[in-house]
């Protein structure tokens, strides 16, 4: 099969992009110019005429109750998947009508480095494979995210106390993706999600998270209340966000945490409840302390992703201040 025309480079009138992608990608073949050329997908594999060959990688199990994450969509998410190198990448599909861009060039270079095939497919074929509305012309198939043990997340490493986030029934994938992205930016070290009645890492989550799932350690637990009990036994203080709580998150972070039995610089977990319903009753009882975010407007409550963002960065700020104060006194 004759390979499709390559995307032209910016400012070039020739068909060659001139990106100089390094050799070594087994899913490419060289052209006469010595530059590895991306290969058009063969007509085999998924039972659809002209579908890219998926032999050699396991089919996606869309009913699994693990973390998921085996299909990654969106340019930034695929870039982080390749750059992180934490799990195998089977192939990267790219639409045949993409305009040249530095990010696409980087994806190709990283794919070559990781020995992942880059397959050029018609736009309609890629969008039929995609599970999000806007995959941005890039889809990757990878090994599923590896679950971590809860006890591992609760362990202090290299002198850094864990800062965890526990999701209690967050079911909207856009909210979960946004929360994961914010958590990673705020320095959260680990994520805990329940195995049931919760969104897991779907293609929508990976896209909205913009690659954050590649940098966060994540554990899946049978139930949140039991997980909180285990975390407390491991010395982790659990702080639940509850709009009806009398204790203000800002007061807790402003130096009054000791009065509530909270060491903000120590092992800490923020517990985020479901959209609308908030924390489950037993989850509330298992938290060390419940806190609320003070509001001054007329709307009843914040969106869960917005509330999480406020909490993550407020706690991160307070932890940094406590750590700096202790360091200055040593």
Image (cartoon, rainbow, N blue to C red):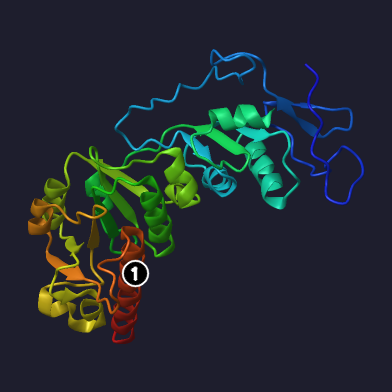
Q: Which residue is mark 1?
A: 310
Residue 254 point in image, percent of width and height: 25, 82
The answer to whether one can see residue 159 in this image is no
- Return the x and y of residue 261 as percentages of the image width and height: 11, 73
> Would residue 203 appear left or right of 7 to someone viewing this image?
left
Does residue 312 appear left or right of residue 144 in this picture?
Answer: left
Q: Position of residue 239 (x, y in %)?
A: 19, 64
Does the rendering let one see residue 234?
yes
Tell me where residue 164 appears, x and y as whole percent. Answer: 28, 58
Residue 307's image quarter? Answer: bottom left
In the depicted view, which residue is nearer to us: 285 or 153? 285
Front residue of 109/95: it is 95
Q: Quadrant of residue 182?
A: bottom left
**Compared to 326, does 278 lie above or below?**
above
Residue 181 higher or lower than 198, as above or below: below
Give 328 or 66, whichever is nearer the viewer.
66
């Amino acid at each position: 099969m004759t390979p499709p025309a390559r995307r032209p480079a910016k400012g070039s009138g020739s068909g060659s992009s001139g990106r100089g992608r390094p050799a070594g990608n087994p899913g490419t073949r060289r052209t006469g110019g010595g530059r590895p050329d991306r290969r058009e997908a063969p007509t085999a594999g998924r039972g659809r005429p002209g579908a890219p060959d998926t032999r050699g990688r396991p089919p996606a199990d869309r009913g699994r109750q693990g973390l998921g994450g085996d299909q990654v969509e969106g340019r930034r998410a695929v870039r982080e998947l390749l750059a992180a190198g934490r799990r195998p990448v089977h192939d990267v599909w790219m639409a045949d009508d993409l305009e040249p861009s530095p990010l696409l060039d980087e994806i190709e270079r990283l794919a070559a480095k990781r020995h992942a095939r880059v397959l050029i497919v018609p736009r309609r074929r890629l969008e039929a494979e995609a599970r999000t509305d806007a995959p941005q012309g890039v889809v990757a198939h990878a090994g599923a995210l590896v679950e971590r043990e809860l006890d591992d997340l609760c362990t202090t490493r290299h002198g850094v106390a864990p800062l965890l986030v526990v999701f209690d029934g967050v079911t909207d994938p856009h909210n979960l993706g946004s929360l994961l992205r914010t958590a990673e930016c705020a320095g959260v070290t680990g994520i805990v999600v329940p195995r049931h009645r919760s969104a897991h890492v779907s293609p929508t989550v990976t896209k909205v998270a913009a690659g954050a799932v590649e940098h966060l350690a994540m554990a899946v637990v049978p139930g949140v209340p039991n997980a909180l009990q285990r975390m407390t036994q491991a010395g982790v203080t659990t702080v639940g966000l509850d709009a009806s709580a009398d204790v203000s998150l800002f007061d807790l972070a402003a130096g009054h945490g000791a009065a509530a039995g909270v060491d903000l610089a120590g092992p800490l977990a923020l517990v985020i409840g479901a959209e609308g319903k908030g924390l489950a009753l037993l989850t509330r009882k298992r938290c060390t302390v419940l806190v609320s975010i003070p509001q001054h407007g007329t709307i009843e409550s914040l969106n869960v992703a917005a509330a999480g963002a406020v909490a993550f960065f407020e706690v991160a700020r307070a932890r940094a201040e406590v750590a700096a104060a202790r360091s200055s006194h040593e």
